[in-house]
């Protein structure tokens, strides 16, 4: 690692809007005067296939172009990925894993004890508010709202602004969902 | 001007919009598809007034653009990999017909085995088709190289290939400056072709030519490409004055007193840049030579950049099987006959088929370079152990 960056890794499945989640978060950081670089890695696009996206953020321009290997922050959009993708790979001690899941028990989640773990049941919020629909509730905006809460790296208001800019809302359900995810995310 | 977060594909589409292209023909192929999708949206929204031709293959895309360019239109397309390869014979035609077409190629390795990840094997195979070849490091450069591309192409009457890396540019989002189109208009006047097809005044172009003229026509192409060095330099200078971004045909970064100069092209230059910064902070005399133009090849700039170097290490994201990396061959060839001809020029092969080139990869390259490795064969980096 040559420079100090805030580095974030997203795990999700094709169709969950993971590339967009990272792009929206990049936008929010940009609104706050920081320099973001979002790097997706995926094969031929298939719904349901595991997808990884990296996000680097710095106070100055980022030149480096490679993947992120030691993210301090990991956002898992689908809790079932913990069993099939190594979501903790390269995460330093004290790093933070944020998971979309109904569980709030580290052992049930299968995550070790050297990381901070935060959970939010974004699927439930999205279904209840009618954001997207089965099998793909639109949880990407909810997860970045939760990310804002547990990391404090970016404010909820700028994350909401980025989401609304990208998805001009017909009503306030997305914003309500984001605020609820922000309130309900739980650091275990 | 507006600074917007976008990926390289969107940046390229903005480059075409700001250049007021009049005809685009398209056939989708990842990782380029986002460019022509974005262009279709710009046309549908009325932001760009252009004819969008949906072709049935890349071969037809280039054939359509050749025809539209002959009719006097400013034309654009984008492709990748197998799609670029399918255009091959028409790339020669476009250059021989002296048409100022600008095309973006988003690097993707040539199959087999089937892959959609980045390396330069697609573009390198088109090196000798008579197009100018421009390699981009950042997304901004893709947007800028398209506008500059028309400026240069329409003066020297040769087509331009703007090259950016799949994934590392095409899908990577970062801040990009989108200029006011009125400012671009001042830089890039409408295309006014010296000759064009017109049904009201019919004539034939590029008919059968015998040995009495063909060679002279090739020599004119050669002269146009030689002239393109100065034209590209001027176009870049003027661009810098108006828009604040200038790149040169090459960029020598920390080369003045460098003992070891790393040479690269495309997106991996950004990673080299940060490693050079870090090594410089530690007092190590390491420099970076970014090659932006592969054609015309900037021989003088390359010679100058490595003048003080004890060692030169060229990092290629491509391989000519049976010889080595192509930038390595080009640099060695440019140095032959110069004052620095006996300095070791090492050739490293890295990052093929999307293999990530990390700061750690560059550290390894530096370490190997310092161990006086063989100079006459390429050195493959980070190969997995054979089982």
Image: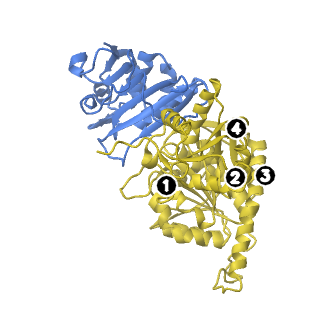
For disc 1, the chain is: B
Q: Quadrant of the C terminus of chain B?
A: top left
Up-down: is A91 above or below A140?
Answer: above
- Counting from the top left corner in percent of width and height, residue B99 is at 66, 68
For mark 3, give the secondary structure. helix
For disc 4, the chain is: B
Q: Which mark is residue B234?
A: 3
The residue beneath circle 1 is: B319
For disc 3, the chain is: B
- The chain assigned the colour blue in the figure is A
CB contact under 8 Å: marks 3 and 2: no
Q: Earlier in the sequence, mark 2 or mark 1?
A: 2
The hue of chain B in the figure is yellow
Q: Nearer the viewer, residue B296 or B53?
A: B296
Numbered disc in front, either 3 or 1:
1
Q: Nearer the viewer, residue A111 or A188?
A: A111
**Disc 2 and disc 4: Cα gap in Å?**
26 Å
Image position of A169 (left or right of A109): right
The residue beneath circle 4 is: B255
The residue beneath circle 2 is: B148
Q: Nearer the viewer, residue A45 or A89?
A: A89
Q: Can residue B240 be seen in this snapshot?
A: yes
- Counting from the top left corner in percent of width and height, residue A166 is at 49, 36
Q: Earlier in the sequence, mark 4 or mark 3?
A: 3
Q: Nearer the viewer, residue B259 or B99?
A: B259
């Amino acid at each position: 690692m040559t420079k100090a960056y805030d580095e974030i890794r997203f795990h999700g499945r094709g169709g969950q809007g993971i590339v967009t989640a990272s792009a929206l978060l990049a936008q929010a950081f940009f609104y706050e005067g920081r320099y973001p670089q979002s790097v997706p890695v995926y094969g031929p696009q298939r719904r349901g296939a595991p997808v990884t996206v990296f996000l680097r953020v710095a106070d100055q321009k980022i030149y480096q172009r490679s993947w992120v290997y030691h993210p301090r922050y990991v956002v898992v959009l689908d809790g079932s990925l913990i069993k099939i993708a190594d979501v903790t790979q390269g995460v330093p001690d004290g790093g933070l894993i944020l998971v979309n899941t109904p569980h709030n028990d580290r052992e049930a989640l299968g995550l070790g004890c050297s990381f901070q773990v935060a959970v939010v049941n974004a699927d439930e919020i999205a279904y209840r508010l009618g954001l997207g629909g089965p099998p793909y509730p639109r949880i990407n905006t909810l997860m970045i709202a939760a990310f804002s809460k547990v990391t404090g790296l970016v404010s909820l208001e700028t994350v909401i602004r980025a989401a609304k800019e990208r998805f001009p809302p017909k009503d306030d359900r997305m914003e309500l969902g984001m605020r609820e995810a922000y309130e309900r995310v739980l650091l275990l | 001007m507006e600074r917007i977060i976008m990926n390289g594909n969107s940046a390229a589409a903005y480059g075409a919009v700001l250049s007021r292209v009049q005809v685009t023909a398209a056939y989708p192929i990842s990782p380029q598809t986002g460019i022509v999708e974005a262009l279709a949206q710009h046309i549908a929204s009325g932001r760009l007034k252009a004819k969008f031709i949906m072709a049935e293959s890349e071969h037809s895309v280039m054939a359509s653009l050749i025809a539209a360019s002959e009719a006097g239109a400013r034309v654009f397309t984008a492709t990748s990999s197998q799609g670029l390869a399918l255009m091959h014979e028409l790339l020669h035609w476009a250059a021989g017909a002296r048409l100022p077409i600008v095309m973006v190629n988003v690097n993707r390795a040539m199959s087999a085995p089937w892959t959609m990840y980045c390396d330069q094997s697609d573009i390198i195979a088109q090196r000798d088709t008579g197009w100018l070849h421009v390699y981009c490091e950042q997304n901004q450069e893709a947007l800028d190289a398209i506008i500059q591309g028309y400026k240069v192409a329409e003066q020297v009457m040769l087509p331009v290939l703007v090259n950016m890396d799949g994934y590392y540019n095409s899908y990577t989002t970062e801040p990009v400056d989108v200029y006011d189109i009125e400012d671009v208009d001042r830089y890039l006047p409408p295309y006014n072709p010296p000759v064009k097809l017109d049904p009201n005044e019919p004539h034939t172009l590029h008919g059968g030519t015998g040995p009495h003229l063909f060679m002279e026509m090739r020599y004119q192409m050669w002269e146009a490409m030689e002239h393109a060095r100065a034209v590209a330099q001027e176009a870049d200078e003027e661009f810098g004055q108006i828009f604040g971004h200038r790149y040169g045909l090459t960029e020598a970064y920390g080369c003045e007193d460098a003992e070891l100069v790393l040479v690269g092209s495309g997106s991996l230059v950004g990673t080299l840049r940060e490693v050079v910064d870090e090594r410089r902070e530690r007092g190590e005399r390491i420099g970076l030579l970014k090659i932006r133009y592969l054609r015309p090849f900037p021989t003088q700039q390359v010679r100058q950049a490595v003048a003080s170097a004890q060692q030169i290490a060229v990092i290629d994201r491509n391989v000519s099987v049976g010889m080595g990396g192509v930038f390595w061959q080009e640099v060695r060839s440019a140095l032959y006959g110069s004052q620095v001809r006996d300095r070791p020029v090492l050739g490293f092969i890295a990052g093929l088929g999307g293999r990530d080139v990390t700061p750690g990869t560059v550290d390894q390259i530096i370490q190997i370079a310092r161990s006086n490795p063989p100079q006459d064969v390429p050195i493959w980096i980070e190969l997995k152990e054979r089982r």
